[in-house]
Amino acid sequence: MDAYPLVQRVALYVTLACNLHCRHCYIDGSPTAARLGESDRSRLVALVASLGKPVDLTGGEPFMVGDLARLVGDLVGAGARVSSVFTNATLLTHRERMLREIIDTAGPLRWYVSLDGDERAHDALRGHGSFRAALEGADRLRALGQQVFINTMLHAGVDTAALERLHDVVETHGFERWRLDSPFNAGAWTDNRAQAALSTQESIALLADVVGRWAAQGMPFELEAGHVLKYLDGMAYFLDSYTDDDPVCPCRTFPVWPNADVSWCQDLSDPQFVVGNLLRDGIDPVYDSYAPFKTRTVADVAASNGVCSVCDLLSFCGTGCRVGALGACAGVDGPDPGACRLHTERLYQPVTRALHEALARRAHD
């Protein structure tokens, strides 16, 4: 019997330290971020392993941890399955021995690498030279037989030409999947959003301009574009659908921060969203505090805000994302204005139309 059914995987933030200072980072990490002592880290490893769920290593930048390979070995030795690593990849070519030790210990992994546009656009967000360093790191992972997924955050520096150039990179370098999304309104992005963000309409127009052409070319990789569409296994999926009894927060990731705090969402690092500390409180009490956020239903939230409850489109948006609602200062039970506009103004239609037309042409040809 699964003692923690509302957890599908653990996001283990091994550090908040980072070698980059990205303008959109929701954590806004520091190279001097604190770490647990040896004894506490060993206890945390054992607790994480006892959850019995796949573990994703993230940060900050995981490769800022000098003994990351030993940490992976400790996790595996404790019975955990390390399944993926989220990295900016800029340090990988300088950490060859560490990288090989991690792969040898954990086996084949899925690596999520950030490329936020072409070289010009990416470097404008993450710093000069970071695009080439990240691409070199991603290529090294592929050369070692690893699976590489690309994550892209859309921002004002990304235009159609930049996306087309990045499309060529994803295709020619053999990366398996590409996710496009928008930054979370937290951390450094709160200071830079006004100057560097794309509006919802601009993001949709950008996607509509390119996804049809990509699909017509055969889409050699999987694609996920925020809450608009997914193109997986050769099939297109548009939006989601919800019933009143569906959980309003379907994500089943259990985020464990470097100090062993757990928040109810991995995108929310502020102390106000922490539900407990594994070292101080133990797993079961923390899980019991985490669970209500994952069992609260669409109907519960809709009834709480008085806006979603009278909306005819509730079954399509499910009240939207709680992070989106919080970012708009609507409160944890408020409507997500981004999701509202996406549906009430049918902003997604240019994207779905372009993709449907491209798929129809392919089928006809």
Image (cartoon, rainbow, N blue to C red):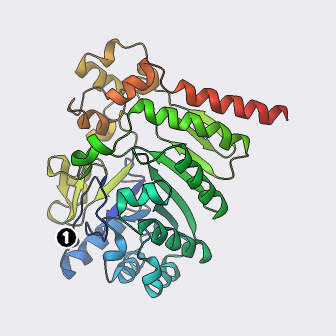
Outermost residue toward the right in this view: 365
Q: Is residue 278 left or right of residue 364?
A: left
Q: Nearer the viewer, residue 279 or 199?
A: 199
x 36%, y 54%: residue: 3
The part of the image, by quadrant, that contains residue 68 is bottom left
Vertical placement of residue 197 versus 278, above or below: above
Label 1 secondary element: loop
42 over 234 or under it: above or below: below
Locate residue 6, reporting x and y percent. Answer: 37, 47
Location of mark 1 (residue)? 33
Residue visible at 29% across and 55% down in the picture: 23
Is residue 330 at least partly visible in the picture?
Answer: yes
The x, y position of residue 344, in whole percent, is 42, 18
Q: Is residue 173 left or right of residue 111?
A: right
Tally of numbered discs? 1
Q: Out of 197 and 332, give the one closest to the viewer.
A: 197
In the image, taking residue 246 as reference, residue 25 lies left or right, namely left
Which class describes the residues within 10 Å of circle 1: few (<14), some (14-19), or many (20+)?
A: few
Kindly indicate the quadrant of the structure image that contains residue 142: bottom right
Q: Position of residue 349 (x, y in %)?
A: 55, 24
In which quadrant of the rendered image does the C terminus lie? top right
- Going 30% across and 21% down the picture, which residue do you hit? 302
- The type of residue carrying mark 1 is Ala
Q: In the drawing, does residue 234 fall left or right of residue 286?
A: right
Furthest toward the bottom, the residue is: 97
- Residue 314: horizontal and vertical position, in percent? 41, 20
* Residue 4 seen in render: no
